[in-house]
Amino acid sequence: MSPRRNRPRRDDDTRLDAERARHGVASVQQWRDGDWQVRAISGGGSTKTYRCPGCDQEIRPGVAHLVAWPADDRGDLTDRRHWHTGCWRARDRRTPGIQRGRSAPRYG
């Protein structure tokens, strides 16, 4: 006879839900320039520095933000852009205030 299990069994569904909670669930949003897949990234899921195309400022690691890419098959993974949440909501009304030169570093 085998000993009794004291811990609950971890299923793959639990791991999938944890990944979904960490990376967010993508939704489709409609804008004037087309449909976009948008995924919210939590502060804990953010580990790199990105540059927001809305305000041209850095999104530091640990800051919650959004990732957007074209919903239809116009692009690929290189078309993903990381946005501050407020910049994404206001993107029809604003453009970057600072224009970087060609020699300035670009962040993904």
Image (cartoon, rainbow, N blue to C red):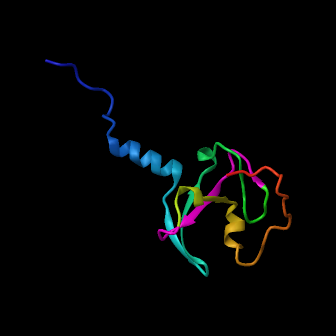
User: In x, y percent, where is residue 37?
Assistant: 52, 66
The answer to whether residue 12 is left or right of residue 72 is: left
Looking at the image, which residue is at 48% across and 59% down? Answer: 25
Name the residue furthest left: 1
- 60 in relation to 39, above or below: above
Picture quarter containing residue 67? bottom right
User: In x, y percent, where is residue 108?
Assistant: 67, 52
Looking at the image, which residue is at 48% across and 71% down? Answer: 72
User: In x, y percent, where is residue 71?
Assistant: 50, 69
Judge by depth and name the residue closer to the eye, 38 or 69.
Answer: 69
Judge by depth and name the residue closer to the eye, 98 or 105.
Answer: 105
Looking at the image, which residue is at 49% across and 66% down? Answer: 27
Count of marks, rendered view = 0
Q: Which residues are magenta?
A: 58-74
User: In x, y percent, where is residue 46?
Assistant: 63, 46
Picture quarter containing residue 6? top left
User: Magenta span has 67?
Assistant: yes
Looking at the image, which residue is at 52% across and 51% down? Answer: 23
User: Magenta span has 66?
Assistant: yes
The answer to whether residue 98 is left or right of residue 25 is: right
Name the residue furthest bottom: 32
- 5 in relation to 69, above or below: above
Name the residue furthest front: 102
The quarter of the rendered structure image containing the N terminus is top left
